[in-house]
Image: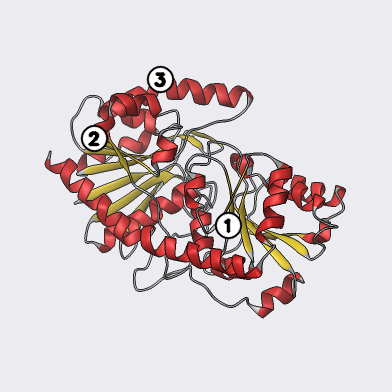
Amino acid sequence: MRVVHLVSTFPPYKGGMGNVCLAQAKNLASFGHQVSVYTPLETSLEILETRSPKKWILETRSPKSRSPKSISDAGFAVRYLKPLFKYGNAAFVPGIIKSLKNFDLIHLHWPFLGGSEILLLWRLFRKKPKLIVQYHMDLIAPGLRGLIFKLNFFLFAPLMVKLADKILVSSQDYLEHSDLKRHWLKNKEKFIISPFGVDQQRFFPQEKKGELLEQYGLKNKKIILSVGGLDRAHYFKGVRLLIMALTELKDKMPDLYLLLVGEGNLRPEYEKLASDLGIKKRVIFSGRVEDNQLPDYYNLSDVFVFPSFSRSEAFGLVSLEAMACAKPVILSDLPGVRTLAKDNGLISKVNDIDDLKEKIISIFSCSEKLKAMGENGLRMVKGKYHWLSIVKEIEKIYVQAVAS
């Protein structure tokens, strides 16, 4: 089957949507399908590591390069589309419809501002290729950006629901609380719950690496980890909340340290906040961590905390990665996000510093309970969140859509 994925961001950009697309493309290619990914060209790209036996390589691109090109690998191709203009993760890419008629099926990752609208208007006048939509999240933001997001959804979500053959959502919980709810209630036959997964060959329990403990001065410390973009596109990750909660714990838990993995233009603000609050030495910014090193950082921690505060957060791949490394979790009480915390962690009230502080104290109160929670999370991941089996189900959806 010839399949093309359309996605607004893709590695090396660090983001859940691109990582989901990457995992799906790699697994579909391993099943023998001809898979391509179309994504807007970033201002610059870097070489990613080569992995075997299924290799995938993204080559360095100069921002002065005039024409995008396809980059093939052992499994699938990535085509970078040059946008007419780009703002944040929105990119106006009229060239996205070029060559789409040569595919059997289009897998659109929503939201894709500047790309999905062009696709839907093009698709309005044809029945093929078949269209599967992966609904990742609602777009929510303050001020003018939020109004633009609402207007876009009002104008194009009904058309998306009408034209899609099937719509995949990561959890029932999120579907029932998202902006899609009213469309789901009218078109339930189109919606399928399809969770995300984790690569359990990369993420698994390991001993803490002594060199990392030494590097960051974390020997014999209690370590909280949070992983996520520190750019304005990910303002809702709750980093400020986590730093403030740690401030209130500096006397009660003097050996507690926070390790933040990620990079972005908000980092200077977070660093200044930690400094102003007097906990600069206890908040460690690792910066960008390469994919092959990321499991070491999860395994360095004692507890993973995911304090997002917006419905723009719908699931949390990083929570799964932590669970696969047998780490207990503290997750925000957000639709979708909270579904990953059962007997493997705690759920914290959204944007509530006091509650987050109490949850941190509680989860560290018993070392045996901490270990048991981590083991429960690992069992949960092994039983339900394996990419190979998840993509096998997606493949069945593809086959049924193309045959109809």
| Marks 1, 3: nearer the viewer | 1
What residue is drawn where x is 27% and y is 63%? 30
Residue marked by disc 1 = 329
**Nearest-to-viewer mark from 1 and 2:** 1
Residue 403: % across, % down: 12, 42
Nearer the viewer's eye, disc 3 or disc 2? Answer: 2
Residue of label 2: 165
Q: Quadrant of residue 38?
A: top left
Q: Marks 3 and 1: in contact by CB < 8 Å?
A: no
Look at the numbered disc 2 and give the secondary structure of its residue. loop
The secondary structure type at the circle numbered 3 is helix
Along the viewing direction, whichever of 215 and 102 lies nearer the viewer: 215
In the rendered structure, the answer to whether residue 60 lies left or right of residue 183 reads right
Mark 3: few/some/many CA within 10 Å (<14, 14-19, 20+): few
CA distance separating discs 1 and 2: 36 Å
Work out how far the residue at label 3 is from the one at label 2, CA to CA, in angstroms: 19 Å
The amino acid type, in three-letter code, at marker 2 is Asp
- Can residue 122 be seen? yes
Amino acid type of the residue tagged 3 in the rendering: Leu
**Position in image of residue 34 (x %, y %):** 24, 55
Quadrant in the rendering for residue 171: top left
Label of residue 155 in the image: 3
Quadrant in which the C terminus appears: top left
Q: Residue at x 34, y 23 (%)?
A: 158
**Which amino acid type corresponds to the residue marked 1 in the rendered image?**
Val
Closer to the chain start, of discs 1 and 2, is: 2
When the figure is inspected, residue 274 is found, relative to residue 198, above or below; the finding is above
